[in-house]
Structure formats: C-alpha cells, structure tokens
Image: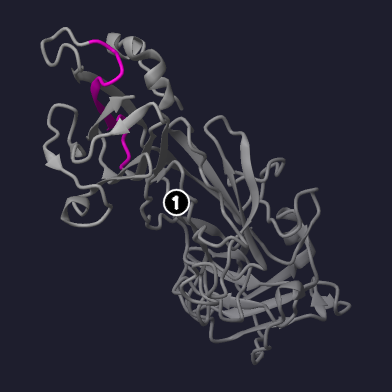
Amino acid sequence: MSIRDSSARLVARLGRWVAALALAILMLAPCTPATASFRSGPTWWDPGTVGSAPDWHYRISVSIPTGTAIGTKIKLDFDTATQLAKLGVSGTLDVNSIRVVRSTAVQAAQQSFDDATYGGTTDSTGNGRGEIRFVTEDAGAATYQVYFDITANGTKTAITQSSITGSFGSATLGTPTAFGIYWSTPNGTDTRTIGYALPMLVKVDASPLSVTASVYDETGTLKASGIQLYNDGTHGDATANDASWTNTGAYSDSPTYTIPLGTTPANWMVRAFGKDGSTSTIGASNGLIRINGSTGTAETRTNFLNVDETYFRVNGARVVTSLIQTIVSDPVNGTSGNQKIIPGTRVRYCRALSNTQGATAENLALTVNLSSKWTYITGTLRSGANCVVINTVEDEDAVGSDDSDGMGLSYSSSVVAFTVSTLAPSASAAMQFEAIIN
C-alpha cells in the first residue's frame, strides 16, 4: 500500500515525494497445542488396545434386577436388525462377535450365543438373530453390556461357547449405542491464530474406517469439509493404529484449513465424522450411527454417536502502522525551523508497527522502496520500541548483533528492509532512516 496519512500535515506537504514510497507487511502468528476433553459415559470395552484389531463398534446394556444372586443364569433373545434399526443403520451380524461384558470391563466367564435359536424355538441361521446366555458374576442390581458387530467392520474370532442350561433369571435389554469419537485438538477452550493451518486430533472408542472433519465459522457457515485425518503414522500422526487420528495441517497433499488473514476474532466450530462399515437406513451418510431416539435429520453430535463437535477461538494479531516524517534541514534555511520542501531537503522517516489484538504476531516484514527522487543517507538506520524511543543504531547489512535482537534493519539497492521476529499484544516496534529529496 502507499504511504500517506491525512492527519499528518507534513505528509501533505511532502506530497509527490512521499507517494514514491511503498510498504509491504507480511504477518504470521503461531498456534498452540490443545489437550483432550472427553464426553462422560461408561468406558468402551476393548480386549486389546483401540486401533489394534479386533475392535467392537456396538453394544446394548442388559439390566439385572435387584436381588439377583451371583451365579444366576440369564437368557435373552437378541435381534441384530432390530437393534441396528434403532441406530439408523443396517449390516450383517458377525455371529462370532457377541460378547457379554461385566461392568468391570471383563468378559463374563460363562456365556454363549446360539444363532439357531430364537424365541425359545429353532430358528434359521444367518438371519441376524439368536439367543444369548450367560451366568452372572455380580449380584443385582447390575448392568452388563452385550458387545456385537457387523461383518463390514471386520470379523471376530469365535470364543468357546459355554453350555448353560436349567432355570433362568430375568433381565432386560436396554438401549443400543455405538462407538464414540471425541475431539482432542481443538478442545473447546483453546485459541487458534489467524493465518495458520488448523491442527486436528480426535480420539475414538473403536477403529473407524475413516475420520474426516469440517470447519464452520461463527455464523455456522461451512468453510471446509472432507478434511482427512490419519492413523497410519503420517501427516503428524504420532503412532500408527492407535486411538488417535491426526492431521497437523503441515502437509500440502492433505491440508486442513488455514484461517484467512482478515478474519474477525470469534468462536468457530469443528465437527468430526468417524465412519464405520454400516449402511444408513435413514438417509444419512453411510457409517454414521444415530443416537437412539434422535431424529437424525442433521449429522451432528446431537443426533449421531460417532460425530463430535467442539469450538475454538479464532484470534489474531492485528498490526497497524503509523508514520512520522520530519524535515531535518534544507539547503537554504538549514535547521532554522523554516525548512522548505525543495531539492536537497533532508527528511527523517519513521514507521512504527503496533499489535492491537490478542495474539502474538510473528515474522513481520516491512519494506520501503525509495524511488529515484530520494537519496538514502548512509548510517541513519535506527530501530526501537516506537518513534520516540528509537536508539538502536543499525548498519546497512542484515547480519550482526544489531540484527539479532528481534529487530533487523538493512539497506540495499534503494530498499530499506525491516523485520520483527515477534510482536506481542499491545507491543510496538519502529524503524527510522533519513533521505534527501533529489
């Protein structure tokens, strides 16, 4: 942009001379990492580690009534299609996946699943329903979980089926749920800086087939979608095949989202989608599992178990400039106070940078290009906190102790270059030099 300041009488007087100067500013600022903030709920059972097969993607609670003794035999009809329908998905039951798990996250020692029995009679196999039996190891009231899965999520190894016969106690199937996904970065409390790529990290209860993310501004307008996260040790992912899916935004082949310069500070939102191998029965994206009882009309955390969303604060450094130009002397009147704008007039030029917002600005660069109407005066480069306190003598090159204090100033080929490594909120930095009007 051109340098002029309508409030400065001197600039108006300099007129055509000042119009020959040009200014360029590049502003970048760092972002900081965040920590996880999980939803509350029963711990998801995993016999190994999340991400290391096998993982289970669905469960349904079983309530054992008060007064039920340890060692009570339980028998339940289980219809996968009915339970998956409540979640808004369909899929083929993996008959080897049925596991009865205690509240201590330990499998019940005695359990079985009979694919050929339903409703107390012989039933066709391979139709997604059967009979679950197990023996209680906790006195009622107690809650067990039946974990199950579909073949599209990878088949499981069969376990030894216990023979459980005799009289049976009562139990009630509860509400089916599915694995969750949770934002760790951003985490709802952290701040992200304008001009930088948004790093992303989510954690999961069970391995999805894919994790993508979308970014929304403060008005809810979608700014980016389909951002791919990784769990293969690439794109900033620390450990392959664990519970964390990551994209740091530092890779050009798969970017996240860079908050544009000029964005107004506000609260923005990210939404993550951890899709499994299920097919939607409600018109949602395949692999998204509805919260039982929700409408499922919007693919949001409110309606889907494997969707999560959180907020982050968009903050930025806003660097403004101010200009002071002073006539030092002219060849007719010297320094008498009546100096004129004529050829040979010596002018002191000072440009200050001030950070007026709440993030630290980094890697600021300012250049002033002198046209043929100006002659730079060697030895006049100065830097400092502002145009009043500007006492650091700078030489014309860009190296040395004078350029290692966070502010660098140099002159070469009619270009004055000023750099500032960091500029904290409310801080300022200034550069100064003198030149003669030709």
Q: Secondary structure at mark 1?
A: loop
Which residue is at 70% across, 41% downward? Answer: 295
> Which residue is outermost to the right?
124
Q: Which residues are magenta?
A: 340-360
Looking at the rendered structure, the kind of residue marked 1 is Pro
| Quadrant in which the C terminus appears | top left
Q: Is residue 90 left or right of residue 185?
A: right
Q: How many marks?
A: 1
Q: Is residue 384 left or right of residue 304?
A: left
The spot of residue 317 in percent (x, y) is 36, 37
The spot of residue 202 in percent (x, y) is 51, 60
Q: Which residue is mark 1?
A: 186
The spot of residue 151 in percent (x, y) is 76, 75
Which residue is at 58% across, 86% downward? Answer: 110
Near-viewer residue (5 or 235): 5
Near-viewer residue (23 or 129): 23
> Which residue is outermost to the front?
332
Q: Is residue 131 visible?
A: yes
